[in-house]
């Protein structure tokens, strides 16, 4: 089976990007990462891309007059990298409808909670884990899903639970959830690149 082409979009530290880079290098994911797109010039993930000799571009919303122009710039850059799969790895800007349309069921997002809990507008980074603690939930976790037009609303691919421990802070919970994110993001990408994910409506089936 030929290598699938992956573009990874980031906004921050890029530890999820690093997990995918390492998995590709270890041949645990049948793909090559052809490009990285960062929504911020100070995203440390850009350093990780550079160390892995992966071409990277910064496309920041503030550099564009409108969301539509931002989307067009993102879409043009994505197309130039010719991906089979787009991974949103800690990507915090919006992915507009034109991109979702063009890459229906070919954009995977990682979210640091058990969707549909603690997700959607305003739930990102440590805010997610603080909300879990404030609510008194006993479990949190991570979710991968295909991206649709909503915020964290697309078909769920994989989830992994993480127990909330006595004395947990947002930081300590985030640290354990991040390990779960890395694990299921790599597994989801591997299944996609082996053509083993089938989407029917909201249901995602893993093919043998
Ligand atoms: C992760 O929890 C991710 O889900 C969130 O930002 C955190 C850092 O991600 N969006 P990364 O290290 O930049 O991949």
Image (cartoon, rainbow, N blue to C red):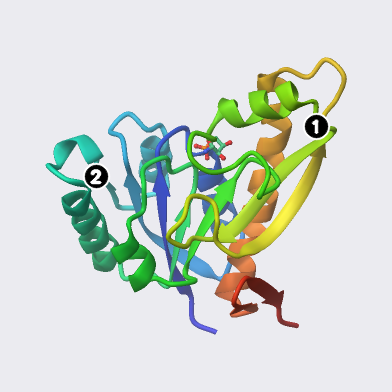
Q: Which residue is mark 2?
A: 59
In-image side of 8 versus 180 (left or right): left
Residue at screen point 36% across, 53% down? 95
What is the quadrant of the C terminus in the image? bottom right
Q: Dot 1, how many residues are within 10 Å of its Cα: few (below 14), some (14-19), or many (20+)?
A: few
Residue 186 in sight in this render: yes
Quadrant of ligand 1 in image: top right
Vertical arrangement, residue 178 with respect to residue 98, above or below: above
Query: Which element carries disc 2, helix, strand or loop?
Result: loop
Residue at screen point 43% across, 33% down? 12
In this rendering, the label closer to the viewer, 1 or 2:
1
Residue at screen point 74% across, 26% down? 135
Q: Residue furthest left?
A: 65
Query: Which of the two discs, 1 and 2, labels the residue nearer the N terminus?
Result: 2
Q: Where residue 168 sits: x, y (%)?
A: 78, 19
Q: Where residue 156 sits: x, y (%)?
A: 64, 61
Place residue 203 in its image quadrant.
Answer: bottom right
Which sits in the foreground, 32 or 124?
A: 124
Which sits in the foreground, 112 or 11?
A: 112
Residue at screen point 24% across, 66% down? 80
In-image side of 33 versus 124 (left or right): left
Which sits in the foreground, 166 or 184?
A: 166
In-image side of 12 versus 200 (left or right): left
What is the quadrant of the N terminus in the image? bottom right
Q: Which residue is mark 1?
A: 137
Q: Where residue 70 sits: x, y (%)?
A: 21, 49
């Amino acid at each position: 089976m030929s290598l699938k082409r992956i573009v990874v979009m980031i906004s921050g530290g890029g530890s999820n990007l690093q997990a995918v880079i390492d998995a590709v290098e270890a041949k645990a994911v049948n793909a090559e990462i052809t490009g990285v797109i960062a929504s911020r010039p100070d995203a440390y993930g850009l350093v990780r891309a550079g160390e892995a000799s992966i071409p990277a571009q910064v496309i920041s919303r503030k550099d564009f007059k409108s969301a539509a122009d931002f989307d067009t710039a993102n879409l043009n850059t994505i197309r130039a990298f010719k991906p089979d799969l787009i991974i949103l790895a800690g990507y915090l800007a919006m992915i507009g409808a034109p991109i979702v349309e063009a890459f229906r069921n070919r954009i995977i997002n990682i979210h640091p909670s058990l969707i549909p809990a603690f997700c959607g507008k305003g739930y990102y980074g440590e805010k997610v884990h603080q909300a879990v603690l404030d609510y008194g939930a006993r479990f949190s976790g991570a979710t991968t899903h295909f991206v649709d037009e909503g915020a964290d609303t697309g078909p769920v691919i994989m989830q992994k639970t993480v127990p909330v421990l006595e004395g947990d802070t947002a930081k300590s919970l985030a640290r354990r959830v991040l390990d779960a994110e890395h694990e299921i993001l790599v597994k989801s990408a591997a299944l996609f690149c082996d053509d083993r994910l089938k989407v029917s409506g909201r249901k995602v089936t893993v093919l043998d």
